[in-house]
Image (cartoon, grey):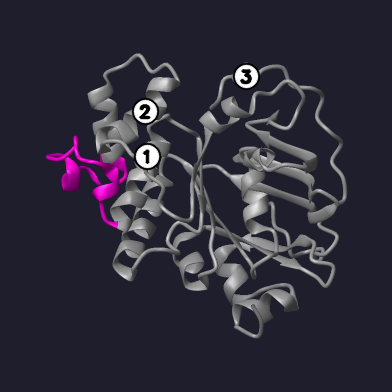
Amino acid sequence: MMPAQALGTVGDRAPRLSPNAGAAADAVDHSFDDVVIDINNLSLWYGKAKAIEGVTMRIPRKQVTALIGPSGCGKSTLLRCLNRMNELIPRVRVEGEVTLDGQNIMAAGIDPVEVRRHVGMVFQKPNPFPKSIYENVAFGARINGYQGDMDELVHFALERAALWDEVKDKLKQSGLALSGGQQQRLCIARAIAVKPEVVLMDEPCSALDPIATQRIEDLMRELAKDYTIVIVTHNMQQAARVSDRAAFMLAGDERIGRLVEYRQTEELFTNPRDQRTEDYITGRFG
């Protein structure tokens, strides 16, 4: 668990509101206790355009949670709120609360860079640094002041990313020389080298072939033994295969994303509580 002082001083918690206005009363299931991220009535604007509204959901520790829904429903926007990456975009405004281990990461005085040390991210397109395989993994730990055995850390991260056996004899070669699937696993190794508690993955397999996709999916399940994984995916089969819980988001005619349903994955796919969820997962739209 993150130390109480890790993110600095946190103000009083905001009162629990009545969000998820677009969801049926029994469509959002929070019947679990070990919560790592708690999202309370979260809304975000890009300039004057509201992108997501009133999202409230709790993310369980050391499980895979999938965010699903059609393009433009706010999945990636919500994901980026969890480590404040949206704030790198000009004219973004956020309201609501996101707590990590009980600490409000949106509070004044919280350093977003420190947040990202605890909540890592893997992007849609593999983006290794133009450095050696070794330096791709070591770089983040080094700039964060890691004082331990760097060789050991690089070995650990590459092994956890199921890449060590493929690259152990070419650590000095450029990470850009790897295949697409290997590059994405290198990015995962880079993320876990700084020892985060949560790893966010924004469509991590969309640019990969089926074999590389299967390896990433297997890796997600393995990593969930030690990390909390939150993934955005357009692939319904992938969400069903890898996630423990799934959240369906949808934007209406006004193009504002809202949470429609959030349940254990098997329940959401086999017995959805909202007709819109059923219509989406059965391919009637999206």
Dot 1 crowding, Cα within 10 Å, few <14, some 14–19, many 20+:
some
SS at circle 2: helix
Segment colored magenta: 159-179
3 or 2: mark nearer the eye? 2
- Residue 273 painted magenta: no
Instruction: Measure the C-alpha gap from mark 3 to mark 2.
Output: 26 Å
Give the mark nearest the N terminus, 1 or 3.
Answer: 3
Q: Residue 171's x, y, as percent?
A: 19, 36
Q: Amino acid at mark 3?
A: Ala
Query: Which residue appears farthest toward the left when viewing the image?
Result: 169
Is mark 1 in CB contact (under 8 Å) with mark 3? no
Give the mark nearest the N terminus, 1 or 2.
Answer: 1
Classify residue 143 as left or right of residue 166.
right
Residue at 68 percent across and 65 percent down: it is 72
Classify residue 150 as left or right of residue 191.
left
Classify residue 251 as left or right of residue 192.
right
1 or 3: mark nearer the eye? 1
Q: Residue 178's x, y, as percent?
A: 25, 51
Looking at the picture, tell me which residue is in the foreground, 179 or 23: 179
Looking at the picture, tell me which residue is in the foreground, 208 or 159: 208
Residue at 43 percent across and 47 percent down: it is 224
Relative height, residue 125 to residue 194 (above, below): below
Is mark 1 in CB contact (under 8 Å) with mark 2? yes
Q: Quadrant of residue 241?
A: bottom left
Relative height, residue 130 to residue 206 (above, below): above
Residue at 39 percent across and 44 percent down: it is 188
Mark 3, residue position: 4
Give the mark nearest the N terminus, 3 or 2.
Answer: 3
Mark 2, residue position: 139
Mark 1, residue position: 129
User: Would residue 32 be seen by someone viewing this image from the given angle?
Assistant: no
